[in-house]
């Protein structure tokens, strides 16, 4: 069975949704597909000792996907128990300092035609999930991929930011939405979003005196994993001045 090539999360925006050729369909409100129904969208995560944030992530994506695949690389906390409790398909993988190998391990076990890559410290509010479901998607899945990429780039403390990612709200949602100023409503290019992200990361790094990890590190200020921050720094060409 052909599987999508694994892609890093990060040159410009990383493709977070990839195509696979397996058939599928959507279940409603649960990561477990209904019996006898194929699977459209799989969420894939690579985790290690993510008990503090994993439940929030899985609860937020469960209504949007047909299955959740969690690849654990050696957790010693409650990560595995949380994944099972949320109905995820849990697999073990011995970490070999190769992120692509770990991701391929999960992708090979995902059954959906489309695969959503998400980190354990990322999540989506129920209101945002409802916006995704109600949007008309005139550009089909390619537009969904672009929206998710923009939401990741402009994420606030790990929460996907749909306020600037969705190019247009459905009329009924737009009528109920609070007014926003012109600058917030303006659609930004991917280059502009990348510049915003880079500036934000640099401000956090400068405030933390270029420490990435630890309680006073930039990752803690940004609400993200140190490994995720290092990955973004590498992709955006951010280097310590020291």
Image (tube, grey):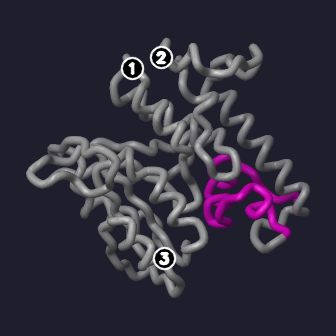
Task: Give coordinates of residue 193: x percent, y percent.
Answer: 67, 32
- Graded by Cα atoms within 10 Å as few (under 14), some (14 to 19) or many (20 or more), the crowding at tag 1 reads few
- Graded by Cα atoms within 10 Å as few (under 14), some (14 to 19) or many (20 or more), the crowding at tag 2 reads few
Which image quadrant for residue 186? Answer: top right
N-term-proximal mark, 3 vs 1:
3
Number of labels in the image equals 3
The residue under the point 62% across, 21% down is 177
In magenta stretch: residue 38? no
- Residue behind mark 3: 79
184 left or right of 87 in image:
right
Q: Residue furthest front?
A: 176
The residue under the point 34% across, 24% down is 140
108 left or right of 120 in image:
left
Task: Give coordinates of residue 42: x percent, y percent.
Answer: 31, 51
- Residue behind mark 1: 136
Q: Which mark is residue 50?
A: none
Q: Which mark is residue 170?
A: 2
Q: Write down the region rendered in magenta.
A: 216-242
Residue 160, above or below 205? above
Indicate which label's residue lies in the foreground, 3 or 2. 2
- Graded by Cα atoms within 10 Å as few (under 14), some (14 to 19) or many (20 or more), the crowding at tag 3 reads many
Task: Give coordinates of residue 163: x percent, y percent.
Answer: 63, 30
Secondary structure type for disc 1: loop
The residue under the point 50% across, 31% down is 147
157 left or right of 32 in image:
right
Verify CB contact (< 8 Å) between mark 1 and mark 2: yes
């Amino acid at each position: 069975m052909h599987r999508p090539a694994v892609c890093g999360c990060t040159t410009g925006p990383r493709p977070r949704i990839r195509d696979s050729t397996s058939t599928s369909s959507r279940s409603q409100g649960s990561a477990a597909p209904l019996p006898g129904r194929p699977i459209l969208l799989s969420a894939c995560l690579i985790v290690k000792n993510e008990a503090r944030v994993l439940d929030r992530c899985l609860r937020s994506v469960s209504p949007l996907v047909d299955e959740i695949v969690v690849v654990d690389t050696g957790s010693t906390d409650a990560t595995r128990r949380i994944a099972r409790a949320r109905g995820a398909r849990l697999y073990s993988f011995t970490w070999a300092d190769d992120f692509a190998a770990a991701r391929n391990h999960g992708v090979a076990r995902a059954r959906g035609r489309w695969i959503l890559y998400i980190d354990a410290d990322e999540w989506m509010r129920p209101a945002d999930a409802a916006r995704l479901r109600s949007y008309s998607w005139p550009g089909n899945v390619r537009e969904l991929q672009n929206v998710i990429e923009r939401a990741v780039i402009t994420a606030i403390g790990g929460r996907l930011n749909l306020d600037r990612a969705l190019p247009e709200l459905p009329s009924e949602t737009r009528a109920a939405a609070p007014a926003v100023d012109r600058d917030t409503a303006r659609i930004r290019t991917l280059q502009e979003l990348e510049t915003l992200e880079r500036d934000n990361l640099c401000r956090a790094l400068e405030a933390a005196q270029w420490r990435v990890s630890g309680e006073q590190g930039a990752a803690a200020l940004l609400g993200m994993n140190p490994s995720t921050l290092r990955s973004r720094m590498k992709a955006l060409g951010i280097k310590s001045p020291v």
